Image: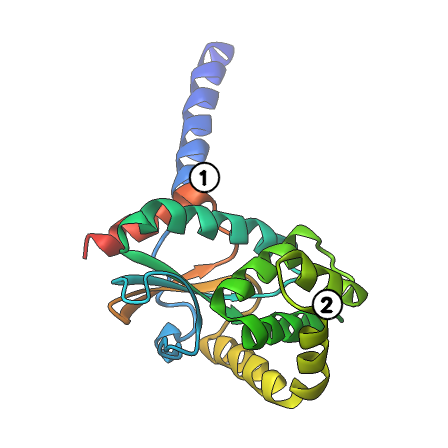
Amino acid sequence: MKSSLTIPLAIIVGGVIVAVAVYVSMPKAQTSAGNPALVRPVSTGDHILGNPAAPVVIVEYSDFDCEFCKGFHDTLHQIVANAGATGKVAWVFREFPLTEIHPTAFSHARAAECVAVVAGNDAFWKFSNALFANQPADPASYGTLASSVGISGSAFATCYSTASSTLDARITADRQNALDMGAQGTPYSIILVNGKNPVVIAGGYSYDAVKQLVDQALAQ
């Protein structure tokens, strides 16, 4: 009698465990994590991919040496290419170098910001893609990477050596904003609907999980 009940009971318990696992893994609005309302308003000075006037904006704080950030970078490119095709979703990239564990992360951030200064927003995104594609990037390769995306190596070198204090201040401000919101790692992102209703994405969510949150935001 005992053995005849064992298998059905095991199936029921297994089903409960699977159901709980599925529920836990589903993306949820995490407005209770830290204080996402402290996110700095998006401005023309930000690095924006997509329509700057999009009603839904994903503000990401990222580290060029973070492996999870590399995968999430690809995910957000896919989100903007698909969900943003109608101009309703945009992506803002902000610097969050985890210098405590990635010694060259701040240097990478400065290099990316230099590219933006020298050649503008589109060049920033191309260089960011190159940094992630070559992760972990060697700082000695900055000039080569810059040239590979059509940026003058000499102009980049001049910026990197002369504008470091201004660029460092910007990077530090981005990092501090993430910390003020309660970010404990990268990638750390905020979904905003018309600049309000912040929803936290703490980690490198999958494409499907991010799309679900974006769809919910668009429905507002």
Whether residue 26 is visible here, answered yes or no, is no
Write down the residue under mark 2: 102
- 46 vs 148: above or below: below
* Secondary structure beneath label 1: helix
Residue found at the very far right of the displayed protein: 140
Mark 1 belongs to which amino acid? Ala
Mark 2 belongs to which amino acid? His
Residue found at the very far left of the displayed protein: 220
Write down the residue under mark 1: 21
Residue 153, image x, y percentages: 71, 69
**Is 149 left, or right, of 31 in this rendering?**
right
Render colour scheme: rainbow
Give the spatial CA distance, label 1 vs label 2.
32 Å
Name the residue rendered at 48%, 22% in the picture: 10
Residue 134, image x, y percentages: 71, 53
**Is 54 left, or right, of 36 in this rendering?**
left
Considering depth in this image, is 162 or 42 the residue closer to the camera?
Answer: 162
**Label 1 Cα neighbours within 10 Å, binned few <14 / some 14-19 / many ≥20:** few
- Residue mark closest to the camera, 1 vs 2: 2
Considering depth in this image, is 199 or 12 the residue closer to the camera?
Answer: 199
**Label 2 Cα neighbours within 10 Å, binned few <14 / some 14-19 / many ≥20:** some
